[in-house]
Amino acid sequence: MSTAVVSRPLTIDEVLARARGQLHRVSPGQAHREQVDGALLVDIRPAAQRTIEGEVPGALVVERNVLEWRLDPTSEARLPQAVDHDVRVLVLCSEGYTSSLAAAALVELGLRRATDVVGGFQAWRAAGLPTTG
């Protein structure tokens, strides 16, 4: 007979807080400086959202549904930029919610330097940082 403890389901706010507890999130300005210095800025927004909102020049577009496979350096489906677990990855979504969950998933894969951009693309654009569209 199993003695597993049954716990209540978490709310999305609790899941988000848990994810963010694993991250050292960065401001849009800090993300831009790190991108200029060679960090990998990864835009996970879907194509339709990028078309409406605009894009960040130089960002690597990897939609959320394939992010872990593309950035795990041990995956056969990895991108050339996924050279090892020490790559600095800055995840960007529209408002900074989905990116926190995505960055935490990358941390779980061993990409210990992964994090996300506070406020996402909306905050990036509001800060007057480079965008297209």
Image (cartoon, rainbow, N blue to C red):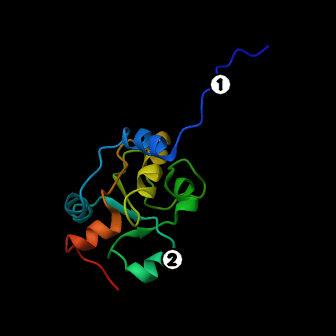
C-alpha span from label 2 to label 1: 40 Å
- For the C terminus, give its image quadrant: bottom left
Q: Which mark is residue 47?
A: 2
User: Where 27 sits versus 51, above or below?
Assistant: above
User: What is the number of callouts on the image?
Assistant: 2
Q: Nearer the viewer, residue 65 or 21?
A: 21
Check disc 2 and report its element: helix, strand or loop: helix
Residue in the picture at 40% in, 41% down: 17
- Is residue 58 shown left or right of residue 14? left
Can the viewer see residue 72? yes
Of badges 2 and 1, nearer the viewer stands 1
Pointer 1 residue: 6
User: Where 54 sits versus 62, above or below?
Assistant: below
- For the N terminus, give its image quadrant: top right
- Is residue 75 shown left or right of residue 110? right
Farthest-out residue, right? 1
User: Where 5 sits versus 96, above or below?
Assistant: above
Of pointers 2 and 1, the one earlier in the residue sequence: 1
Q: Which mark is residue 56?
A: none
How crowded pointer 1 is (Cα within 10 Å; few <14, some 14-19, many 20+) is rated as few
Can the viewer see residue 110? no
Residue in the picture at 52% in, 58% down: 67
Q: Amino acid at mark 2?
A: Ala
Place of residue 120 in the rendered image (x, y in percent of width and height, measured from the top left): 34, 63
Place of residue 34 in the rendered image (x, y in percent of width and height, measured from the top left): 23, 59
